[in-house]
Image: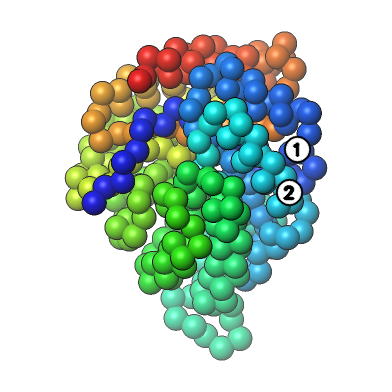
Amino acid sequence: MAATLEFIKGMTWGWPGIRGTWKTPEAEASLREMVDRLGVNWTAVAFSALQDHPQATEIRFEEPPTVTDEEVVWAVETAHALGLKVCLKPVVNCKNGTWRAHICFFDHDVPGEPTWGQWFASYERFILHYARIAEATGCEMFCVGCEMVQADKREREWRALIAKVRAVYTGLVTYNCDKYQEERVRWWDAVDVISASGYYAPERWDERIAAIEQVVAREQKPFFFMETGCPSRKGSLRYPNDWTHQGPPSMEEQDRFYRAMFAKLDGKPWFHGYMLWDWPARLYPREQAPRDDGYCIYGKTAEATVRAYYQSRP
């Protein structure tokens, strides 16, 4: 049976969760600005923990630079106090800069080589730690993983992990697959809500909406974009997922992305909203917005576009 889910008018907050940047006056001001300026009803409190490289098998979530448990609890409680529902989103990254989608091991164990079993044992400890915090703080949703393209194939391990999450956490469970992967994940039935990273260029939206609609019809689960957005940078409209793309700042380019996306998805009965990317714990000075070329929409043209769209949704 599909979970009941209101339309998510959300924004990701706090990424990448560097220790010492949460539970500060600047972080509280950032959360308040996000609520006041955008009219959000949800936030994804997102942070990363590091493993050394894609074939490492230890995730060091207790160590810097990952935010402390105290900071995580503070962020959730502050968001709740501001009237928001919260999805807690712990994410693994590689210290050497390799994207987490490339974390991968041999399909079959080989003596002396790192294995999927070793990695999932560490990942399970990481995820269950924060699932317990999500339960203790009353988070309405918990995300068990993000953009783990190579790991997505390990269906047995994901099902086992999600079952263990459900033993300690009673809210909604989701998984954030990467762009173009919505129809490739074979274990959507194990979660309550399907979510994805919707970094699609305007010319791709019709194709991707058709593909996602088939997944939703098959699985009978609510769907939303756990991530989506575009840098305010010339040329980023074609490659909204590419944070390394070089180009001069362009608020108009970012705004065009949001307008195109909202127009394509508005009114789809199976679509349940957005957790936009992203709003940092420490905002740049508002007067610097025209010169900032990142994903954050604070003080940019897209801020008004997002606010107007969210206000138009019940």
How is the model colour-coded?
A: rainbow
Q: Using the rendered view, name the quadrant where residue 133 is placed.
A: bottom right
Q: Which residue is mark 1?
A: 23
Q: Earlier in the sequence, mark 1 or mark 2?
A: 1
State which quarter of the image contains the C terminus: top left
Q: What residue is shown at x 49% (from left), y 15% (from top)? A: 307
Where disc 1 sits, the SS reads loop
Q: Is residue 86 above or below residue 94?
A: above
Residues at discs 1 and 2 in contact (Cβ within 8 Å): yes
Name the spot of residue 7 as percent of width and height, x first. 36, 30
147 and 132: which one is in front? Answer: 132
Could you tell me the amino acid type at mark 1?
Lys
Q: Is residue 261 above or below residue 88?
A: above
229 and 69: which one is in front? Answer: 69
Whether residue 207 can be seen here: no
Could you tell me the amino acid type at mark 2?
Glu
Horizontal placement of 309 versus 299: left or right? Answer: left
At label 2, counting other C-alpha atoms closer than 10 Å, the crowd grade (few under 14, some 14-19, many 20 or more) is: few
Q: What residue is shown at x 53% (from left), y 19% (from top)? A: 38
Name the spot of residue 122 as percent of width and height, x first. 60, 70
311 and 54: which one is in front? Answer: 311
Where disc 2 sits, the SS reads helix
Q: Which residue is mark 2?
A: 70
Q: What residue is shown at x 64% (from left), y 50% (from top)? A: 48
